[in-house]
Amino acid sequence: MPKETFNEKLIARLKTHSDFIDESGELLPAAVKDRAWHLDHNLIKLLLTDEDIKSIFFDEIEGHWVFNHNTFIDYITTKNFLANSYTQFRNKIGLNIDGKFLRERGEVSLVWPYKDCVLEGGQTKEEEKRKEIFFNEILAHDEINQMFDPKVLTNWKRHTVSGEQDVIDIQRDENGTIRENLIIKGNNLIALHTLKQQFRGQVKLIYIDPPYNPDSPSNTFMYNNNFKRSSWLTFMKNRLDIAKELLRNDGSIIVAIDENEQNYLGVLLDEVFPEREKHCITIIHNPRGVQGTNFSYIHEYAFFVIPKGKKIIGDTKIYAEEITWNNLRNLGG
């Protein structure tokens, strides 16, 4: 009987864990890879039970075994790891989101590179050329905590009908909560986390006008608008996550967007706010239209994310004389 190869031994070992196999007992390498990226304790303990496997994927440092997850992931990603792997897995995906694999979730999920990262995001023209850094939520825990620690707000000014005034103290209620309107100039992600301790669960309405991420060199916003889609999605998810923490249970969030990222933003909002309703409306902002290759866009979009089953939008009667109808035609604009 031929001796068991290292590859066969590794596959057999991985198949002993129910999270890494499908209903028919076939290995799900995507699930294994995902757990390896997240340094899953169960996977590491499983690999440590075999001396040969341990010697390949672990380094011994002063009596401690350190998992070399890059070597492990490179190995299981090679085409020789499993023969004809696509058909063996019956086209099942093992990606893990919120602790569940896609095949277990029964819903649409948006997956992109750097999803499990934090992107600080350049906010000004001066920063638009800088190389953005993605901080992994697990590997860069200290850096993220430092970024999100409350910051000291400086250069306070109060603007009244009488003009600009120096700020001596801030008006607060009996609970110590700030009761003045604030305009904060700075990185919005850092500013939102600075406000978190004071306003968590207290905000009734949040409006976000993010960079629209157009596929063009133009940049009409005071943002770094040079994101690729995966970077843009990470940028947005980071900010929506903290916005959710600030919202009241009966609070709502409105996000403006145009056609460039409307579809992706809609799915992202479903994922971040599954317990709320999402509605998308069109807003006409340029009746003459912005000429594109085939269509002139006269509108943008606004997503309303609101509490389920609650009436929060007032009724407005629209009269017949307020409605105009036009045939779909090329006006040559």
Image: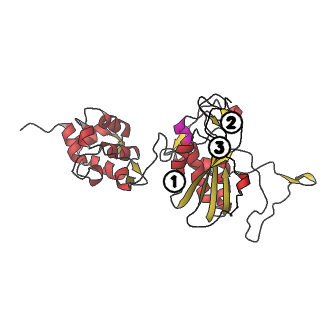
Q: Sequence-wise, which precedes: disc 1 or disc 2?
A: 1
10 or 254: nearer the eye? 254
Inspect this view and state whether residue 64 appears: no
Determine the residue positioned at 67% across, 61% down: 203
Amino acid under label 3? Glu
Residue 300, disc: 3
SS for dot 3: strand
Q: Which residue is mark 2?
A: 289
Q: Residue furthest left?
A: 1
Which image quadrant for residue 30? top left
Q: Mark 3 or 2 closer to N-term?
A: 2
Display coloring: secondary structure
x 27%, y 38%: residue: 86
The span from disc 1 to disc 3 (Cα, nearest Å) is: 19 Å
The answer to whether residue 327 is above or below residue 153 is above
Amino acid type at circle 1 is Asp
Q: Kindly report which numbered mark, 3 or 2, lies closer to the viewer in this rendering.
A: 2
Residue annotated with mark 1 = 270
Badge 1 or badge 3: first in the primary sequence: 1
Part of the protein shown in magenta: 211-232
